[in-house]
Image: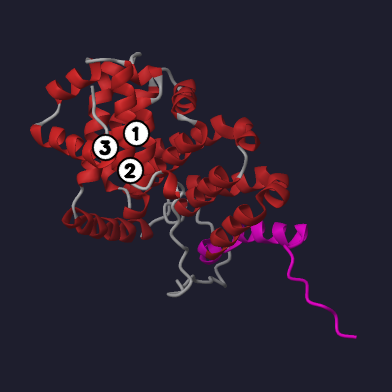
């Protein structure tokens, strides 16, 4: 009798073989990254949690040892953040941040910076802005200020178009939620600068996006010429290559959907909550510190959201 085909999830051995392929063939990394993200999305709590340290090891290897494939490591990490319960990752958070900052210190690239900003945004949405500041400052005192000044402020508007809404919502909560930013040690140095960076993200034009694409293409070409450390492919007699499938692209997802249809309106509503709880304080800061153009933009966002700042 013909045996029935089992369309269930892979066995543990096949899953382990999938992980081992990362270590041997660099050409398989993009496809295997997509496959691993599918495991995480569809059955993360039953398959991936049991192998979580192995999956995080894949993330660490890709980020630490490859300029070419580091973005695949971040894609896996972001999938873990999105799909797993926060309790599954709590014990690993500090180590994750150390891996990221170590790589940033050793070999900073534009692609890496964009990946880090997107990951930070996912983290803020999942764990909250307060926890983000706590994690960053636990590595080094007042490190959060360095992160904002060296990453968010100069680089926020350069993220990919598909990531802009995510980053805008995350930075909005970074502006309006944590007391360290709204009235604590970081208020005087960071609040207005971060707001300006967020407004610049909203205002980034199509022309700038085209320039950014060209810059990213050149950056990718430069990065392809050399690996950071030891190459992931240690089999010189067989080097598989990866070809993108035109009709099998990863679908674009909106984490917020109808709950936050417009990030600009979300900023306006959060600013309304913030200004109403601190009468005149933030309104005066914005009036005195922002350009006329920026003030008009905020007024437009408030009109779209049907709110008034007081």
SS at badge 2: helix
> From this viewpoint, is residue 65 visible?
no
Image quarter (top left, top right, bottom left or bottom right) of the N terminus:
bottom right
- Indicate which disc, 1 or 3, sits on the residue closer to the N terminus: 1
Q: Nearer the viewer, mark 1 or mark 3?
A: 3
SS at badge 3: loop
Q: Nearer the viewer, mark 2 or mark 3?
A: 3
In the image, 307 versus 33, the foreground residue is 307
Q: Is-magenta flag for residue 26?
A: yes
User: Picture coordinates of residue 194 (x, y %)?
Assistant: 27, 30
Q: Residue furthest left?
A: 292
Residue at the image point whose x is 51% and y is 66% from the top: 27
The range drawn in magenta is 1-30
Q: Which residue is mark 1?
A: 172
The label shown at residue 263 is: 2
SS at badge 1: helix
Image quarter (top left, top right, bottom left or bottom right) of the C terminus:
top left
Residue at the image point whose x is 56% and y is 32% from the top: 93
Q: How many marks?
A: 3
User: Picture coordinates of residue 297 (x, y %)?
Assistant: 17, 38
Labelled pair 1, 3 in contact (Cβ < 8 Å): no
Residue at the image point whose x is 33% and y is 46% from the top: 262
**9 with respect to 92 (left or right):** right
Q: Residues within 10 Å of mark 1 (few under 14, many from 20)?
A: many
Q: Residues within 10 Å of mark 2 (few under 14, many from 20)?
A: many
Task: Name the main secondary structure of what is drawn in magenta.
Answer: helix
Q: How is the image coloured?
A: secondary structure
């Amino acid at each position: 009798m013909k045996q029935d085909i089992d369309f269930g999830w892979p066995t543990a051995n096949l899953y382990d073989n999938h992980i081992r392929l990362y270590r041997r063939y660099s050409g398989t990394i993009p496809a295997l990254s997509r496959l691993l993200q599918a495991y995480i999305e569809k059955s993360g709590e039953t398959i991936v949690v049991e192998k979580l340290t192995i999956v995080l090891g894949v993330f660490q290897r890709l980020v630490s040892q490859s300029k070419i494939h580091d973005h695949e490591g971040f894609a896996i990490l972001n999938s873990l953040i999105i799909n797993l319960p926060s309790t599954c990752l709590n014990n690993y958070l500090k180590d994750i941040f150390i891996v990221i900052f170590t790589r940033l210190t050793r070999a900073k690239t534009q692609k890496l910076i964009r990946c880090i900003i997107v990951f930070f945004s996912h983290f803020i949405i999942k764990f909250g802005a307060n926890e983000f500041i706590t994690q960053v400052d636990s590595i080094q005192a007042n490190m959060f200020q360095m992160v904002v000044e060296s990453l968010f402020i100069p680089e926020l508007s350069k993220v990919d178009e598909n990531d802009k809404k995510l980053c805008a919502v995350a930075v909005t909560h970074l502006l309006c939620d944590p007391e360290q930013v709204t009235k604590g040690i970081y208020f005087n140095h960071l609040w207005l600068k971060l707001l300006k960076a967020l407004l610049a993200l909203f205002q980034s034009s199509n022309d700038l996006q085209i320039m950014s694409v060209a810059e990213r293409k050149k950056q990718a070409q430069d990065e392809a010429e050399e690996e950071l450390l030891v190459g992931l492919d240690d089999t010189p007699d067989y080097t598989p290559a990866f070809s993108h499938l035109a009709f099998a692209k990863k679908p674009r997802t909106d984490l917020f959907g109808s709950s936050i249809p417009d990030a600009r309106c979300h900023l306006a509503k959060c600013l309304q909550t913030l200004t109403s709880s601190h009468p005149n304080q933030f309104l005066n800061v914005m009036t005195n510190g922002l350009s006329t153009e920026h003030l008009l933009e905020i007024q437009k966002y408030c009109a779209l959201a049907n709110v008034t700042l007081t």
